[in-house]
Amino acid sequence: MDETDFLKGGIEELQNMINDLENRDVCSNQVNVCANEGKKLEKELKQEMEALNKDIDKTVNEERQKAISDEEEIISAGNKRLKEVRSEREKAKDKGIRDRIESETQTLVEENRDLHRTVRRKLKENGLPAYCDTKWFYALYCTQGGMEWLVKLLVFVAGLILIPGIVVAIVKPWWFLKILLWIVVMVVFIGIYMTIYLLTKDKDNGTLEEVRTERYKISDNEKQIKKIKKGIKTDKDESYYNLGEFDKEAAKLQEQITEATNVKNEKLKDFEENKKSEITDKVNINHASAIQSKKDEISKKVEEYQNAVNVYNESSALITDKYEKYFTKQYTNKLSAQRMIELIQNGQAQNIEEAFNLISK
């Protein structure tokens, strides 16, 4: 169309322009519809592929577990029983150790029991209480040797300094009362010490020193008992405790577990190398129809989308070539065309050129 002829045209030419613009909008909408439908189909295909992978994983895991279920049961039961056997063996060994200690120290224990009876009988005959037959009493009232002097020193430090200090720190009275309370605690400690002294050491006529011989013998026996206990507990030879039956059963169980583990590993190897691919192929076949159908739909939709794009491009090119060279892109729209039609209908313009000049001012 000649430029002069178009600009001299009127309502019919503008109505054709509106129709062409509406046609372009329809084409644009069709492009968007195809694009959205394509995205939806791609999402559905992705979901189908995810479902396929999940189905493969689930089926493969189930079949793998089924293939080794017998061996798994043997291994599980074997480990459970092996744990029980080892626990029973440990208990039997502990009992054997206790029995062995009791047997090998019986003479010393009985001798100490008799020595204690002798000591307490002598104490009673001389009016002394049974608690005189203790290490603490001899350390505090019949002190001999470096260890007993150390114990006595620590007891007096605790009774005269540590305990009063703790008591004063807890109650937190006025400073004068603190001193008084400290003195009271010290007096109580000394009072208790002297009371025991008056009831025992002060009344003693040599008995405490007389029974020291028995006490030395008791101490020697206790050291010997400790030495025997330590020797038995550290002895690596377990032949004393008759643990052979436990060891036989444990070895048999371990052999069964090892054999089942080897069979399980062979089955797993065979499964991974052979059966897994067969299972995967079967699952793929079950999903193949749905996946291929979805891919075919996507191919069709891609073709529809490309056709819609081509039609849209042709429509856009037509509008660019037919109208934008007169009105520019700014005024090449339905609203501008409608305004120009109204100006011509109202008699304000005689043709398209006059109407355009009016709306573009």
Image: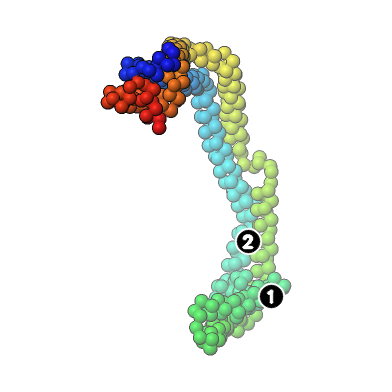
| Rendered position, 264 above or below 239 | above
Q: Quadrant of residue 88?
A: top right
Q: Quadrant of the C terminus?
A: top left
Image coordinates of residue 206 in percent, x first then y, are 65, 80
Q: Establish if 318 lies above or below 169.
A: above
Left or right of residue 56: residue 349: left
Amino acid under label 2? Glu
Q: Name the element at disc 2.
A: helix
Residue drawn 64% across the image and 74% down it:
154
Relative placement, left or right, of 185 versus 240 is left
Mark 2 surroundings within 10 Å by alpha-carbon count, few (fewer than 14), some (14 through 19), many (20 or more): some
Residue that appears at 51% across and 80% down = 172
Q: Which residue is mark 1?
A: 149
Residue 137 x %, y %? 61, 74
Query: With 236 as the anchor, is 18 left or right in this view?
Result: left
* Coordinates of residue 26 in the picture (x, y in percent): 37, 18
Residue to which mark 2 is pinned: 111
Q: Closer to the camera, 311 or 74? A: 311
Quarter of the rendering containing residue 30: top left
Q: Amino acid at mark 1?
A: Trp
Q: Nearer the viewer, mark 1 or mark 2?
A: 1
x and y percentages locating residue 241 in the rendered image: 62, 42
User: Which picture quadrant has residue 275?
Assistant: top right
Secondary structure found at label 1: helix
How many residues crowd mark 1 within 10 Å: few (<14), some (14–19), many (20+)?
Answer: some
